[in-house]
Image (spheres, rainbow, N blue to C red):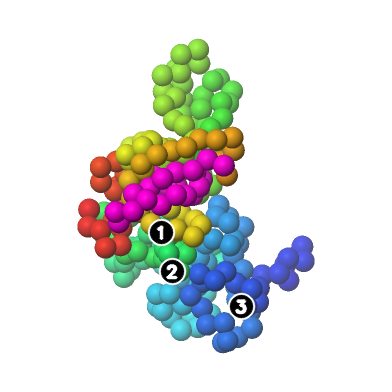
């Protein structure tokens, strides 16, 4: 138990179905630390090291090498064994020359997709909220918990404000400089990040906006057929070509 009475573990039988663990081996599983990703949709760094990548065999060994600072998430060293690694995060293991991006997957929910070192220098982040702050500047709140400030020269004519909710930013990590803006619009490429069609990739054919995000839908062309999904389940990944490497797609 923590000082505030919150459990650091949860029963294996209660863990999200996509976690690749053996539920019959041991009663408890490590609980994610508070972080930018929902606890029900993230991979704990210890779980990645021990159960997915199988770099070590035991909890003790995993905890030790994490504490030594061998692992980076989005370019920053992580030493918290329960750190939540989530959608589009980049895991770097420089001592092994291995790099991975977390992507949605139809079978596991979330997977680690191996990428090249040069691709580990950037990530995609979806804008979930946009606010105007003091001085007329714009603050973009992104899906992974980070905020980016867009400075505006003239608040009465904010030419710098080209961003909308649901747009996706390609940013450098860890500097988080904006490299490219991917607009949420028809004919752009998207991946479905949740729901029964999670992991499907295709071109947006139609966006139907109704009152509230759960009423609005997006139609995506996937393998020659049309898939209908919720507005908020759609994550833009490119224009004519994806900006990131994807399973079975070489870009």
- Sooner in the amino-acid sequence: mark 1 or mark 2: 2
Residue 107, labelled with which disc?
A: 2
Tell me the crowding category of disc 2: few under 14, some 14 to 19, or many 20 or more residues within 10 angstroms, Cα based: few
Residue 12 tag number:
3
Question: Residue, x 56% and y 30% (percent of image)?
Answer: 131
Report if the CB atoms under discs 3 and 1 are less than 8 Å apart: no
Look at discs 3 and 1 and give the one toward the viewer.
1
Magenta stretch: residue 249 in it?
no
User: Which range of residues does the magenta coloring cover?
Assistant: 215-236
Q: Nearer the viewer, residue 58 or 141?
A: 141
Q: How many numbered badges does the structure rendering display?
A: 3
Q: CA distance from mark 3 to mark 1?
A: 25 Å
Above or below residue 160? Residue 78 is below
Q: Position of residue 241 (x, y in %)?
A: 25, 46
Q: Residue at x 57, y 42 (%)?
A: 215
The furthest residue to the top: 156
Sooner in the amino-acid sequence: mark 3 or mark 1: 3
SS assignment at label 1:
loop
The circle on residue 199 is: 1
Does 30 appear above or below 209? below
Vertical arrangement, residue 88 with respect to residue 207, above or below: below
Q: Nearer the viewer, residue 109 or 177?
A: 109
Picture coordinates of residue 50 (x, y %)? Answer: 46, 77
């Amino acid at each position: 138990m923590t000082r505030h009475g919150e459990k650091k573990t949860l029963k294996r039988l209660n863990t999200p179905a996509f976690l690749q663990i053996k539920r019959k081996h041991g009663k408890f599983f490590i609980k994610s630390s508070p972080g930018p990703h929902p606890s029900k949709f993230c991979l704990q760094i210890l779980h990645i090291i021990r159960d997915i990548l199988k770099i070590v065999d035991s909890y003790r060994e995993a905890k030790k090498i994490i504490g030594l600072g061998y692992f980076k998430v989005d370019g920053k060293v992580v030493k918290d064994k329960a750190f939540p690694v989530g959608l589009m995060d980049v895991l770097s293991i420089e001592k092994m020359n291995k790099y991975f991006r977390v992507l949605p997957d139809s079978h596991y929910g979330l997977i680690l997709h191996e990428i090249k070192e040069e691709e580990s220098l950037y990530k995609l982040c979806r804008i979930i909220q946009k606010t105007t702050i003091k001085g007329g500047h714009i603050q973009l709140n992104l899906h992974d918990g980070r905020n980016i400030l867009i400075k505006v020269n003239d608040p009465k004519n904010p030419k710098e404000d080209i961003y909308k909710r649901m747009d996706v930013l390609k940013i450098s990590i860890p500097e988080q400089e904006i490299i490219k803006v991917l607009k949420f619009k028809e004919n752009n490429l998207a991946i479905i990040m949740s729901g029964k069609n999670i992991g499907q990739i295709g071109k947006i054919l139609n966006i139907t906006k109704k009152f509230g995000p759960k009423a609005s839908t997006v139609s995506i062309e996937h393998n020659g057929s049309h898939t209908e999904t919720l507005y908020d389940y759609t994550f833009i990944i490119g224009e004519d070509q994806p900006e990131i490497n994807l399973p079975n797609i070489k870009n």
